[in-house]
Image: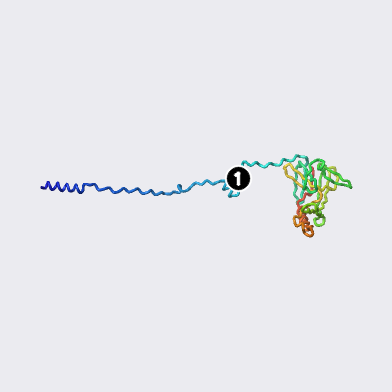
Amino acid sequence: MRTFLAIIITSSLLACGGKTPPSPAAEEPAAPTEEVTAEATEETVTPDDSAEAAAEGDLVPDASAPEPELAPRKPDNADFNVTITFADGTTQSGHVRRTEVSKDWYGEKEWADTAGRLVIAMEAGGTEEEHPWTNIGSISIRPGSVSSDTNCTIESDYTPWMYTCELKTTSTARTKDGRRFTISDRHKWRFFFDDDTELEFWLNKLPARMQDEGDMGRENPENYAIYGELQAQLRNDIRTMVKTIRVE
């Protein structure tokens, strides 16, 4: 009997408890948290040199652009040394390799460089002579007073009209043979030195010129204020003008 009950109890337990309980549903793995690092988010930016240069106002040179051509050096036509003293006390010494003289009085048009034109007009005892620079020993230029020794004129054949004020000078030359002359040459001269520097100057009468850019329809077309401006310019120019030239 006991054996029978044991069998029944065992069978009941197997019927009720023999099933394996279902496994819990597997949880889906959590999405990994992305750690954003400075290395992952920071982009390396290469600066644009052209844009930066443009922003700073610097122009990037164009390698394909041709270089500007330099003006050819004018040929030599002179060979003498000079020492020049200016009104402010400064001096300039050097070898003159080329000379030119203006075809007009003011150096506003063409320049001559031939031997026949490169002579200085001067006079002594009522006789006028022309001498090249190689005959000159020294030249002295002394300006007069701007207020009393200036002659001003107007030229209506210019448009606008041209105003000119010329300061009288006492200009003398001594030739290498010791003769003394008064310079009458009114043209503008130009020296070219070995170091390519240039010097422009007058030997006789110092001019200042200006065109009238104002209203030419005024009742009195002559603008007297310009005369005052030109005389002020002369006062400034005589501070640095050429005073003496010694030719060696």
The residue labelled by disc 1 is 60
Q: Residue 23: horizontal and vertical position, in percent?
A: 27, 47
Q: Residue furthest bottom?
A: 219
Residue for point 22% across, 47% down: 19
Taking depth in this image into account, of 126 and 81 the one nearest to the observer is 126
SS for dot 1: loop
Q: Residue 211: horizontal and vertical position, in percent?
A: 76, 53
Q: Is residue 115 left or right of residue 13?
A: right
Residue density around tag 1, few if under 14, some if 14–19, many if 20 or more, within 10 Å: few
Q: Residue furthest right?
A: 126
Residue 157 in sight from this viewpoint? yes
Q: Residue 104: horizontal and vertical position, in percent?
A: 80, 47
Taking depth in this image into account, of 245 and 208 the one nearest to the observer is 208
Q: Residue 15: horizontal and vertical position, in percent?
A: 19, 47
Residue for point 51% across, 47% down: 45
Q: Amino acid at mark 1?
A: Val
Q: Indicate how the structure is coloured in the image.
A: rainbow
Quarter holding the C terminus? top right
**Looking at the image, how many numbered discs can be counted on the residues?**
1
Residue 238 in sight from this viewpoint? no
